[in-house]
Image: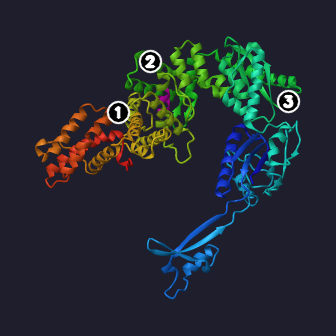
Amino acid sequence: MAHNYLLEIGLEDMPAHVVTPSLDQFATKAAKFLKENHLDFAGIEKFATPRRLAILITGLADKQEDVEVDAKGPARKIAQDAEGNWSKAAIGFTRGQGMTVDDITFREVKGVEYVYLHKSIVGKPAAELLPGLIDVVKSLTFPTRMKWGQNDFEYIRPIHWLVSLLDTQVVPMQLLDITAGRRTEGHRFLGEAVDLADATDYVAALEAQKVIVTPAARKAKIAAQIDAIAKATAWTIDLDADLLEEVNNLVEWPTAFAGRFDEKYLAIPEAVLITSMKDNQRYFYARDAQGHMVNAFIGVRNGNSDYLDNVIAGNVKVLTARLEDAAFFYAEDQKKTIADFVARLDTVSFHDKIGSMAAKMARVKTIAGVLADQVSLPEADKAHLLRAAEIYKFDLVSAMVGEFAELQGVMGQEYARLAGEDPAVALAIKEHYQPISAEGELPTSTVGTLLAIADKLDSLMSFFAVDLIPSGSNDPYALRRQAFGIVRMLAAHHLAFDVAAEQQAVAVALQAADQVGTLDYLKNAKALTDFMRDRVAQYLSGQAIRHDILDAVAGSATVDVAGMIDAAAILTKHQDDADFKAVMEALGRVVRIADKQPAHVAIDSALFENSTEKALHDAISAAKAGYGEQPSESDYQALRALTPAITDYFTETMIMADNPAVRANRLSELTGLAAMIHQFGDVTAVIVK
């Protein structure tokens, strides 16, 4: 007989961003518990509001399945002596299985007799096992935790009730002073506590108490209400997915409403209006039929439509206060020029061990110039890049960013545009922060991309220069994120970027510009190179690259980001080829010998002792003629074409010849070939079967 089991954790209101991941974690850990305890089930339904996390396990088996087990023990010659007496090993084995030596049988395995015990294990009832789910409740992890009362126990918020119901029966469970039962709480203001008769009554019983416990149903109701407002007003309302998710996790019984603010505030830049509404107040915004923002906001109340006019009036009052501040700051900022702001950056510290923000901008301009020359950036774009680098942090000292920190870059673009800067410069000022997360949006413009790389590279080199290197989980300056951002940008634009060479070029340029100060930018150059190597590996791990190919590419002697990414893609493309094994084995053999005993003498064909030496030498010379500086499909095909010659060479040629000159000649041939192979990383790490 199949059963349904409900487990609900009742809490004080959780932060919105915690609700969904906590619910997913709850369901995942519960499923793992059931599988580990061999309790079959059909599925797990998930429910959550700000005040509760709940799961309903459906199709739950009555009990564990009965299991027949054959346990293998020691060999017979160890279990019994010559007289047939049982040894301590045999007695200990049976005792550990909860049986006696009378239960022993013998079976022959590969010509040797072993002790066996046959056990019939009767499955435990589900009701006997389910109380163990309290450990799942306790094990949930959260970004922040708190204590309450006199308890040492920590959780995201204080727990107020537990529901543990197997069909109609309460499954005993205790957490601190809370005893699980069948009573759950309705809406804080609109509902009451309710006793559930059956686990499957959960959704309907709480809806009657003005709580929609199914997140998808609650979200659909919010979306439908907002759509109704849009149709009634002829507005287009941006139903931002992230905001909708957040609002959904702030309410139990949603009621959407629209409010109006004074039209004069539309003179404020849209980015400020959107931030004030969306980020600060959790409001959606609207546009008219022409796409212009209207002086309106759409909020979602945790309650019904009673006294909704009062609710709207209160929200208008709060939003108006924020918009009034924004209007004031915006007006104050217009009284200053970009040069005024830039001058103030001398007094803003980037880091006390590194220097001011103004000094950072000067370094970034130098680095940007190096990058521009390396990628042969057109002169007009280079001029825009250097101008952007001169001013790109200026909005940090604006009144608006001082109040709305999340608008840094956004206000820089807006103020640069108003000041008459070229649109490419203004856009780069905004884009240099990107990506702002591991999977965040990348800059769309070349100028913005190069400025973002220059800014992040300066941060990496500066912090490494003062020994502020991330270790373990400690990364207070988000250097891993910045390095990963560089990797993603280089990959997107396919820019050549040898990390070690880049550091050297930047250090030389900064020295020439007298911008080094007391810092040694090459002090931890190898550490930074290895740090970037790890970020490339991180990037590739998210690209469905086979583990051994990832290891091969990460083992590259140099860290040319785009080259490593290309190498991984090419090896992955050919990993299922019929000859991939032969190619990797041949190239790997070359590398193992050459890396162990490299030689660098001029190849003397007069020292060739068989035809395979000349054949390989000629084939290598032909391959080199079209070989590029970065891994490419044609380079792989060139190495692939060498495979027969390499195989014949090793069949006919003893590399470690007695004659030192012949030996050096052969090793030098392989060393040159290995240098070509190394363009694809350490191919010896590729696993072929």
Is residue 476 inside the magenta stretch?
no
Residue 633 tag number: 1
Camera-side residue of 100 and 450: 100
Q: Secondary structure at mark 1?
A: helix
How far across and how far down the image is residue 648, in percent?
A: 21, 46
Residue bounds of the magenta highlight: 451-457
**Considering the numbered disc 2 on the image, is that residue within a helix, a strand or a loop?**
helix
Instruction: Tell me if residue 258 comes above or below residue 102 in the rendering.
Output: above
Amino acid at dot 2: Asp
* Residue at 50% across, 23% down: 448
The Cα atoms of the two marked residues, 1 and 3, are separated by: 64 Å
The residue positioned farthest toward the left in the image shown: 606
First in sequence, mark 1 or 3: give its number.
Answer: 3
Q: Residue furthest bottom?
A: 83
Image coords of residue 435 (percent x, y): 54, 30
Name the residue tied to disc 2: 381
Q: Is residue 580 left or right of residue 406?
A: left
Tell me how many marks there are: 3
Q: Does label 2 or label 3 sit earlier along the sequence?
A: 3
Q: Earlier in the sequence, mark 2 or mark 1?
A: 2
- Secondary structure found at label 3: loop
Which is more toward the observer, 381 or 155?
Answer: 155
Residue type, label 3: Asn
Question: What is the C-alpha distance between the residues marked 2 and 1?
Answer: 31 Å
Residue 451: percent from left, percent from top: 48, 25
| Side (left or right) of 155 relative to 528 | right
Residue matched to label 3: 304
Quadrant where the N terminus is found in the figure: bottom right
Q: Residues within 10 Å of mark 2 (few under 14, many from 20)?
A: some
